[in-house]
Amino acid sequence: MKIPFNLIKKHSAELFANAENCHLLCISKYFLMSNPAQSLETLHDIKRMMERSSRFISLSGWSGIAAGGCALVGAGLAHQRIVHYYQTEYQVVPGAIKELKLDLILIAGLTFVAAFVLAIFFTWVKSKKEGVAIWGATARRLMWNTFLPLAAGGFLIWHLIENNVYGIVAPACLIFYGLALVNGSKYTMGEVRWLGYGELILGITNLWFPGKGIIFWSLGFGLLHIIYGFAMWWKYDRVSVSDDNLQGVKAD
Amino acid sequence: MKNPIEQLNKVFDSRIRLGIMSALIMNNRSNFNDLKELIQVTDGNLASHMKTLEEAGYIQVEKGFIGRKTNTTYAITTSGKKAFKSHLDALEKMIRSID
């Protein structure tokens, strides 16, 4: 189904900004769908409804920022733990590597849970504000399509850790997360795709810098999330106030 | 030139029916409650618009059960897709007519 969105974009400004056409818009209520401004508004409605029915749009920018913050804290803790291991335990305390492994998995798990809970929380707040149910067909589809690549990657990483192949754990995390985002972007805000591309590039680059996992990890899960979250907040959440004003003007 | 207004489909005059069609074209199948929430109308209102669309042959209704609760699902028909598409084309022509 092709909708002339470029056309909508092109004419929106001139139709709505122009005072003469505003007049036209008001009169149009009495001649149902009999002029271009009315058609344009109808197309806008159709586009909005198509998006609402197929995409999960309550994802908040704050979710990204919070997840990024958690990732940075987690990476910091992990870094400290690794430094501690090499400074005091390495080749001194037998079996310390096992403890390090467990601690790192624990830190990663807690980071994931914290990021996930915060992301859900901010999305819940946003959906509440917009009066959209958080759990529905769109949310279900989004979940399934992001969790599938994540679960597959999770098994691979589990297997890598079991076999003491640590060099590609961080790249694998980033790559599978990137794939999950690209896949999920079809069912939520399209911009998620760009975040996914970023994670993929970082993950693939990381393959050639095996010792620098934690840096790439913080860049990918920390910095990229924060940048993405801020961009989304800037684009959507911040605008919602002025959007209301616009509707007020139109109603006049 | 033919007047594009004549090509606009009377069935799609209603915003609610237009909303239903927009939602159905993006989903293979939707159930009554999802549509109700999406379009934010009352049960009776949605049902009557659904009836109109069904009578026009644009949507296909399937009544089923989930446990004991009724679960009515809707899908767009081929002729529904066609009608919606030409309605969109007509709208597009209206916008182009100001060029």
Image (cartoon, grey):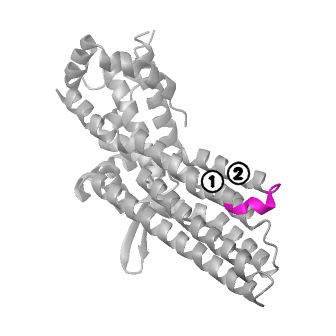
Residue drawn at x 80%, y 61% as measured from the top left: A210
* Distance between mark 2 and mark 1 Cα atoms: 8 Å
Assess whether residue A245 is covered by the magenta stretch: no
> Where does the magenta region start and end?
A207-214
Tell me the kind of residue under disc 2. Leu
The percent coordinates of residue A37 (x first, y second) are 33, 21
Q: With respect to residue A85, does A74 lie above or below?
A: above
Q: Residue at x 48, y 70 (%)?
A: A114
Q: Secondary structure at mark 1?
A: helix
Q: Secondary structure at mark 2?
A: helix
Q: Quadrant of the C terminus of chain B?
A: top left
C-beta proximity under 8 Å, tags 2 and 1: yes
The residue at 37%/40% (across/down) is B18
- Mark closest to the chain's N terminus, 2 or 1: 2
Q: Which residue is mark 1?
A: A219
Chain letter of the residue carrying label 2? A
State the residue in front, A84 or A43. A84
| Residue A168 against residue A90 in the figure, above or below | above
How would you rate the neighbour count of disc 2 (Cα within 10 Å): few for under 14, some for 14-19, many for 20 or more? many
The residue identified by callout 2 is: A202
